[in-house]
Image (cartoon, rainbow, N blue to C red):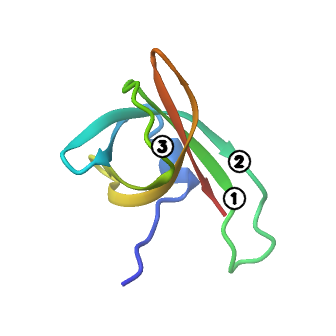
Amino acid sequence: MMMTLPNKKHFDNHAADLFEISFSENKAFPCRIEEVKSGLKATNKDQNDQFSIVFACNETEVFEQGVYKISHKTMGEFELFLVPVFGDNKGVHYEAIFT
């Protein structure tokens, strides 16, 4: 069964909402969308527009790039490949790219 991922419009509509990312089996960390950025436009109807999102997480531990479960109150649960792109003593930002 193939999972349908949210599109850019879904993330734009919920950019101010709280998301939970399960970086470990035992605990989900609250995160917010820091940025939703447009990429290349689809050239035909069988393609999707490219975009990226950056989640800001207040957890200062840096988790390796990988596939993690994302939970949202109305968007439900889905998995994304996240890459840590920035971190300091206030938290870490993780990016997902949709192509």
For marks 1 and 3, the one nearer the N-term is 3
For marks 2 and 3, the one nearer the N-term is 3
| Label 1 Cα crowd, 10 Å radius (few <14 / some 14-19 / many 20+) | some
| Label 3 Cα crowd, 10 Å radius (few <14 / some 14-19 / many 20+) | few
Q: Amino acid at mark 2?
A: Ser
Question: Nearer the observer, disc 1 or disc 3?
Answer: 1
Q: Is residue 72 left or right of residue 36?
A: left
Q: Label 2 near label 1: C-beta < 8 Å?
A: yes
Q: Quadrant of the C terminus?
A: bottom right
User: Label 2, on which residue?
Assistant: 38
Q: Where is residue 73 shown, x and y percent of the image?
A: 26, 46
Q: Amino acid at mark 1?
A: Gln
Q: Where is residue 32 shown, x and y percent of the image?
A: 42, 32
Q: Label 3 near label 1: C-beta < 8 Å?
A: no
Q: Where is residue 61 shown, x and y percent of the image?
A: 39, 30
Question: Nearer the observer, disc 2 or disc 3?
Answer: 2
State whether residue 81 is above or below residue 87.
below
User: Label 1, on which residue?
Assistant: 50
- Disc 3, SS: helix
